Amino acid sequence: MLNVKSKKIQNILDSQGVALKVINMAESTRTAAEAAASIGCEVKQIAKSLIFKTADTHEPVLVIASGTNRVDEKKISALISHLIKKADPDFVLEKTGFAIGGIPPLGHKETIKYIIIDKDLLELSELWAAAGTPFAVFRLTPSQLVDLTHGQVETIA
């Protein structure tokens, strides 16, 4: 049974006309390594949604990165023409409606203007993303990720 946040993500997926299903996991999917272990996939297949914020305007920036990659904040800053910094948990919850460890790539409380997708994700046939909680995920393809988020595909590592 899906909780309220996971059900919201399932409803969004359904409304987009994609046959993607949110799955509750028995083990934590809070980190990319935990998610991969719980799902039984490679860490690089985890599409981790990370929230940063612009240093000047305090706008949220969503970076969807491969589970094995570290985000180069200087690259992201150059791409969006704003310095970025890590967002604290309160900012993340306020802007997305989700806590760190369960942030999905879509369905956020506020519209996020800057969405960057890790180019490395496009080399894979199957991805897994968080679905609102640290125990819920859904499987999708890289093209579905791009279509659903309207993100800009870039090298981020």
Image (cartoon, helix red, strand yellow):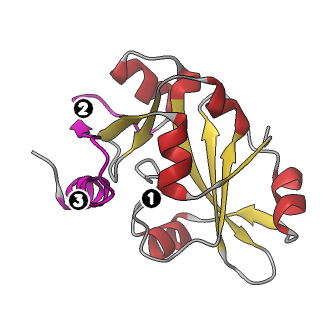
- Please name whichever residue, 87 or 120, is drawn nearer the observer in this view of the structure: 120
What amino acid type is highlighted by mark number 3?
A: Asn
Q: In this rendering, would 41 be left or right of 153?
A: left
What amino acid type is highlighted by mark number 2?
A: Met
Please say if the residues under marks 2 and 1 sit with CB atoms less than 8 Å apart. no
Residue occupied by mark 2:
25
Callout 1: SS? loop
Task: For the C terminus, give its image quadrant.
Answer: top right
Q: Residue, x 47% and y 43% (percent of image)?
A: 144
| Labels 2, 1: front one | 1
| Labels 3, 2: front one | 3
Magenta highlight range: 4-30
Mark toward the start of the polypeptide (2 vs 1):
2
Mark toward the start of the polypeptide (1 vs 3):
3
- Please name whichever residue, 12 or 99, is drawn nearer the observer in this view of the structure: 12
Residue at the front extreme, as displayed: 17
Q: Is residue 91 above or below residue 140?
A: below
Q: Position of residue 49 (x, y in %)?
A: 54, 49
Spatial distance from mark 1 to mark 3, Cα to Cα? 11 Å
Spatial distance from mark 2 to mark 1, Cα to Cα? 19 Å
Residue occupied by mark 3:
11
Does the segment drawn in magenta span residue 50?
no
Disc 1 crowd, CA 10 A, few/some/many (<14, 14-19, 20+): many
Mark toward the start of the polypeptide (3 vs 2):
3
Disc 2 crowd, CA 10 A, few/some/many (<14, 14-19, 20+): some
Q: Position of residue 13 (x, y in %)?
A: 31, 53
What amino acid type is highlighted by mark number 1?
A: Leu
Q: Residue, x 63% and y 32% (percent of image)?
A: 122
Callout 2: SS? loop
Residue occupied by mark 1:
106
Please say if the residues under marks 1 and 3 sit with CB atoms less than 8 Å apart. no
Q: Position of residue 70 (x, y in %)?
A: 73, 37
